[in-house]
Image: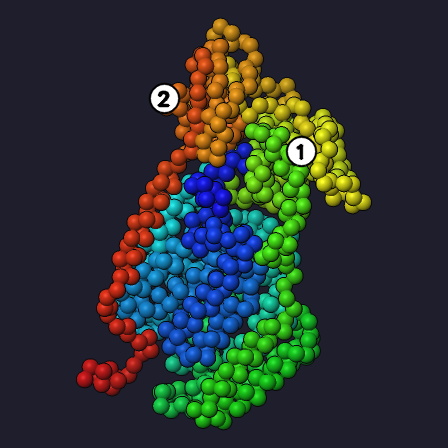
Amino acid sequence: ARWFARGVLPLWNPYALCGIPWIAALQEGFLYPPHVLYLLLPTPTAFAASTVFHLIFIGISTVLFARRAGLGYAPAVLAAVLFVLRGTTILFAATEPPQLEASAWLPLGALAVVDLARGGGRRPVAILALSTSLSILAGYPQITVYLVYTWVALLIALLVGGRPGVRRGVAAAGLFAAGLALGALGGGAQLLPSAELLRLGTRSSQSLTVDAMFPLVGYVFGNPGFRSLGEAVAGSSVSFGVVGLAFAAAAPFAARRRPLALWALVCCALTLVFALGPLTPFFQLYRALPTLSWFRLPNRVLCVTDFAFATTAAVGFDAALAVGDRMTTTPRARIRLPGAVLAALLALAAASLLVIVGVGESGDWRPALVAAGGIAALAALAWSRPSRRPPIAGALVALAVIEIFLTPPLDEILPYTSSATAVYRKHEKTFVLLGRIAMSQRVWVLNWISPDVAQKRLAIYGLRSFDDYEPVNPLRQSQYYTYFVDGAPTVSHWPWLFPGNLINLKPYGQAPPLQARRRLLDLAAVRFVVMHRAALLQPEVRDFVQAAGLQRWWMPLPREPATPTGEELVVFENPHALPRAYVVYRSRPAPEVSELLGRISQDGFDPLVESYVEGAPPIAGGPGSRQRGAAAPITLDEERVVEVEPTLASPGFLVLADSFYPGWQATVDGAPAPILPANHLFRAVPVPAGRHRVRFEYRPWSFTLGAGASLASLAVIIFLLRPGREASSRTLTPTSAPARAARRA
């Protein structure tokens, strides 16, 4: 938000991992329009406002979808209640806001699909495109992929069930594809930079292994989908609930909404099975579907499960309300509809029995009491006249709400107030001081799960963090950091992919300890190492500090008194840290990655004497070239622009210890100059003898082209949404020949 306020687009993050493309890292959602709240409000207030906005939007759009699909008001409200107030929606709101924002557009896109299946034209296309592009811009592509699969399945179900004819079916499918394509174009400002990063990164468009897909303690105990089975009936925020399950059991008897019911039932069951991972053979189908195996934690597909479940329950509720309503049902429906109430009653009784015998997290009697109230309301519904059913329907919806609010609240710290976020400011004075001292050099904060030293906050203080959690990262960084810890360029153990932060200082296998590769820390210009004092109790940390020659910082730290648990910070200075910018007069071609990293990690490697540069002939040097290079002063150090003024005795290279990545452009005294990879991770620019000004500027073509695509898509969407008459929608429900004849007449 501060960057936008200064007119700076956050395209590049210089404060993490020696620099990383920021907008391409997918999860930040910088271009997501509702994030304008962070420019207008204090951050905690903006968090709360964004969450409330999305929950309200999800509720309203779910009601609109259910109504457009032909369901009554009470069933539509029940669908919104079950989708908004329980399950993944609440979990996303509390723990993963980007996932909430990406999934918020599922109901609106489904509404557009309903209209397209009915023969709608430009406006449903525009709404589908808008839903797709906003889900992309929210910054969680895995959720967007799930949404697209859900919409595709819904369209197929409605077209098959509605029997519109081949020509109309093909037209609807074509308009649907056009809407998705227009939406993808609208997300181009996010998609193109991300595609570039995937091409050059560790998370390429290839299938992950099962171990990599479930990095948290495996696919059994580390799978939230499996863990939630024990509380599926009642007792927690992820439980389906006895009221919802009862009406879901009635959905197969909804003759008037059969295509919608079958889609919802199949979608709910299949995604629930997918979330269990390799515990079922259906996971092979999940992995075979395009793009799904690119992402970790398949249990996130439960957001689709919850939407499909809410729709299933709403369809069943609608069928139960239609009992005896002979004015609006077909003869076949009059025979089958009473089965909806019977199925709901039996399901309520079964759920109540399960709760009483202790199935569920709490084994509480209150859900059983809710089930008893539901049985009474359903009995009254079955025997009442249609004119008296609205209050009973309202009572059933109220029972669903009451059941949800009877569950224990989530045990999460919500960052909606200044007091709740105070933990992140605990060491603020220390980091402000370090920001003034470190200047252009880097800081390594040893942190695993402590929020008070979260690396992402270092950017606020102008500190360049050596590592940070960025699971989508360039391959060069993954190789460099993995070699630093393990002595090998590829990850061969948990968590199976380089996550961006160094979560363990113990090398894997028989590799020498970390201090044997300390030089990689020096090359990255890491001057300070910060940790809790308690971290020194770990042998690998204590040994590294001693063997690497780190020196305790002499300056007293503000507000860091000693504590019995060692929660205060201690700062060590790295006396071997190299300058972030320097001149070198000799170069060699880079060997294979493992050999290169092995050479530059040796204590005797001096990059100011000789560096490894890719893509350029080696420089043996001229007069004065045998001397050691020198540090080069950085005169301008901004987020996307760095200027250095080196002085060279002979032609050589200016090396900047920032990540090499496409999109960076260099000039020497205003003339374009190539940027070459140096010492595997960093940048080198050939510079002639004398004093020069070298300017690095990040101007990625991927964002420029993507932003143009997004603006073009927005213009088309606005044009399609223009006021004007549009062809009326056709019904989803198949009609008989006499009815069609009457309509023609």
> Looking at the image, how many numbered discs can be counted on the residues?
2
Q: Position of residue 66 (x, y in %)?
A: 41, 73
At x 61%, y 53%, the residue is: 418
Quadrant where the C terminus is found in the figure: bottom left
Badge number at residue 529: 1
User: Which amino acid type is shown beneath numbered disc 1?
Assistant: Val
Instruction: Give the labeled residue for mark 2.
Output: 671
User: Which amino acid type is shown beneath numbered disc 2?
Assistant: Ala
Picture quadrant where residue 701 is located: top left
Residue 452 shown left or right of residue 129 in the figure = right
Q: Position of residue 636 (x, y in %)?
A: 48, 27
Give the farthest residue toward the top.
Answer: 623
Q: Helix, strand, or loop for circle 1?
A: strand
At x 31%, y 52%, the residue is: 713
Q: Earlier in the sequence, mark 1 or mark 2?
A: 1
Q: Is residue 496 visible?
A: yes
- 730 over 651 or under it: above or below: below
Q: Is residue 285 visible?
A: no
Report crowding for label 1: few under 14, some 14 to 19, many 20 or more residues within 10 A (C-alpha).
many
